[in-house]
Image (cartoon, helix red, strand yellow):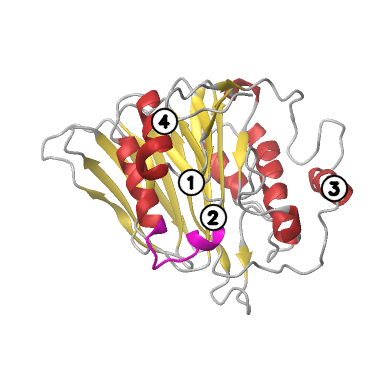
Amino acid sequence: MPIANRKNLKRDQQKSRGGEWNGGDVTWTGEDVNDHIEKWMKDMGLFETDVDIPKSGRLDECVIATGQIDGNIMLVKNRDRTYKPTMSVIHYRTKKGIEIAIVYDKTTQYLEGMNEYGIGILNSTLLNEDDSDAEGTYNREQGKIVFKALNTKTIDEAIGVLTTQSGGLEGHTMVADSVRAYHVEMLKGSESHVTQLDPTTGWDARTNHGVYFPEGGYMPRDGHIYMSSNYRKALAEIELSIADSPKKIMAILRQQHNEPDSHLNMHRRVPASDGYPYGFMTTSQIVMDLSLRQLFFHSYNNVSEFCGQVENLLPKGYKSKIKIKLSNSDH
């Protein structure tokens, strides 16, 4: 497939992935989902160790995905962190007069969200060690790119920003509106790869290993954590196939099919250790219905700080086009 560059941004139209999964925790052949994925991992030689051995640095990981429910395009995310973030949900009208709703990490100054034109953006990093530095500038610079992309009126403009501004947004980015969805994959210093996705064929998920850039993120040499990234991607695509509402999406993404402290779970609850002094936790969830202009944010009280209210910075008397719904739980 052709590579998009910063001048022409040609799109690759993704073909159907084939079969569909219809039933919860089994594949189309009736095999248990976890057994099926684990067997594939073993066949690929990805079980290199029985112990989770982290790379150096403080790692932050995510599951992002896009698909549709009743024709409405959705963007979703489980956000995993090895620190306790302080989060805000901000409803704002930019200087260009564009209404946006963003989820903002005050610890790192990273943000993502949607705007009044139904453009939504979520990202999962491929630079885990850089992303893990909560005091560095990496997340802040990434957040600035997302903010500028949300300050546009069309998805084509937004993709143009994501692939060119300050060198482009690193990692896996899902960007969509009420009609189209795209995957943008990029490493610093490389040309972006932009692929149009087809939500009618099922859900597309991304985690923390490269697809078009195999040298990005986790690689086979990283052993168990590479296996975890592949496993969570595959599991999300299978499990989300039965989602019929934003509430169901959140319930699916907080399932734990393995031992409660396993890195293989989409909902991470890995306890503190030498490699993870805070532990490895799913701290929040985001679901965006881009057709209805709705943003759902769920925070976990024990592993993140959140005031529980939207920071409404809209002009007085302004009638908002985006609806925000908040929820929280202890675990």
What's the amino acid at mark 4? Answer: Ile
Estimate the x, y position of residue 73 in percent, counting from the top left: 49, 27
Q: How far apart are marks 3 and 1 (CA)?
A: 27 Å
Residue at label 3?
Answer: 44
> Which residue carries the number 4 mark?
159
Instruction: Give the mark nearer the N terminus: 3 vs 1.
Output: 3
Is there CB contact under 8 Å for labels 1 and 2? yes
230 relative to 40 in the view: left or right: left
Task: Tell me which amino acid carries mark 3.
Answer: Met
* Sequence-earlier tag: 1 or 2: 2
Q: What element carries label 4?
A: helix
Q: Which of 107 and 226 is in front in this view?
A: 226
Labels 1 & 4 near each other (Cβ < 8 A): no
On the image, the x and y values in percent for residue 171 come to 52, 46
The C terminus: image quadrant = bottom right
Residue annotated with mark 2: 127
Residue at image location 48% in from the left, 46% down from the top: 170
Q: Is residue 156 above or below residue 311?
A: above
Residue at disc 3, secondary structure? loop
